[in-house]
Image (cartoon, rainbow, N blue to C red):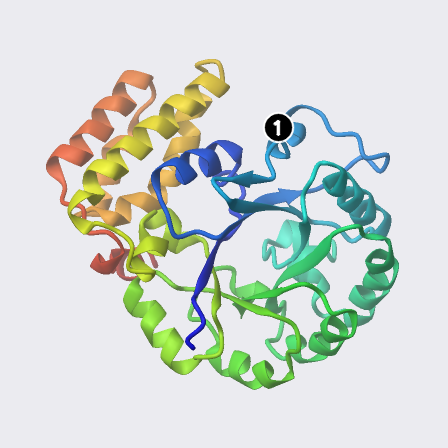
Amino acid sequence: MKQETQIYLAPFQGITGTIYRETYARHFSGVDKMLTPFFTGIIKEGNLSGRKAFELEKTALKHIEIVPQILSKDADEITSFGKLCGQKGFSEINWNLGCPYARVANKKRGSGMLPFPEMVEEILEKVMPELPLKFSIKCRLGYISADEILRLIPVFNHFQIAELAIHARIGKQLYKGTTDLGTLEKALPQIEVPLVYNGDIFSKTDFTHFQKRFPSIHLLMIGRGLLVDPFLPSVIKGEAPASKHKQIAHRFITDLYLAYRKHMNDRLQAISVMKELWGFMAFSFSEPHQAFNRLKKSKSFDEYEDAVAAIFEQHEWLGSEGGLYGKLSEP
């Protein structure tokens, strides 16, 4: 019997917070799990307030499990965060070993820890016996070299982490260049924990090609592809009524905008957050650079709303199968 594909929403700092996740879950199907953007600087006593507390209010949305993620190299901090999440009713936390940005990696956090398997092992030795919930890891193939993953896999296997999500690039690449499926193929036979694949699934065609090469992988984590086309998970699963995509996308983007305005007490910061998302979603429309250009210049709510109306009136919805993100977003 063929195993069904499960799709996770990858965390994206600044975009996929609580408001995005709640609004997304109301409008779209196909996602089985959502990771939060990473938490960092957690107070060791486990006290959270303000924005951090807001991000941990809900453990699930419409039966979609929410998994809090932490970025840290401090075992006590990770343990405290895990215990806090367990008290709030979460069943899993995720450790970010994938963030590629130099300001993080240079401090041996995120993907910057991948060249140091002994450091990862030391942290897991302290954390795993203390956690009251499942512990998964999101990482890259390495930071400097893709072969770094080969030294880490025995560590992950030893501790039997709940899941291992691998973005098939190295940290130094950021999001440039192509994914390294050759190294993933070499690593796959050694991995003894459930593997989640992440990286450059921008369309159902991409998914089909990946599935043919890796028929044993049934867990996918999608980030940029979902931000471009929020229907992508349901398209992959064959659930989406294509004739209504543009109307549903319009309702989604309107509801999301209004939710940000309400949450931010009508501060113009709501437009800035929406522009971050539109930097991806514009590629679901014909002539995406033209579509995004006017919106990018908007400085008031009226200007933003007029720009969005023009996009939906003047541009065709192509969705992920238009393939424009991969073709036009690279420099």
Q: Is residue 231 visible to the viewer in this orientation of the structure?
A: yes
Residue at 47 percent across and 38 percent down: it is 21
Q: Is residue 145 above or below residue 327?
A: below
Q: In the orientation shown, which residue stands out farthest toward the front? A: 1
Furthest-left residue in view? 314
Tell me the quarter of the picture where residue 326 sits: bottom left
How many discs mark residues in the rendered view? 1
How far across and down, in percent of the image, does residue 216 sit?
Answer: 48, 79
The residue at the point 31 percent across, 44 percent down is 281
Q: Position of residue 159 (x, y in %)?
A: 78, 69
Question: In what quadrant of the picture does the N terminus appear?
Answer: bottom left
Image quadrant assignment for residue 309: top left
Q: Residue at x 26, y 21 (%)?
A: 303
Which structural element holds mark 1? helix
Q: Residue at the spot x=66%, y=23% of the render?
A: 50
Question: Residue 94, how many percent across, how many down?
Answer: 66, 53
In this orientation, which residue lies closer to the viewer: 43 or 243? 243
**Which of the pair 97/22 is nearer the observer?**
22
Q: Quadrant of the C terminus?
A: bottom left
Q: Is residue 106 visible?
A: no
Task: Please tell me in which quadrant of the rendered image residue 118 appears.
Answer: bottom right
Does residue 192 lie above or below 309 as drawn? Answer: below
Give left or right: position of 265 versus 93: left
As drawn, the residue found furthest toward the top would be 265
Q: Which residue type does callout 1 highlight?
A: Phe
- What is the crowding at mark 1: few (fewer than 14 residues within 10 Å), some, or many (at least 20)? few
Q: Is residue 197 left or right of residue 178?
A: right
Q: List the residue tagged with mark 1.
A: 54
Instruction: Estimate the x, y position of residue 320 in percent, counting from the top left.
Output: 27, 56
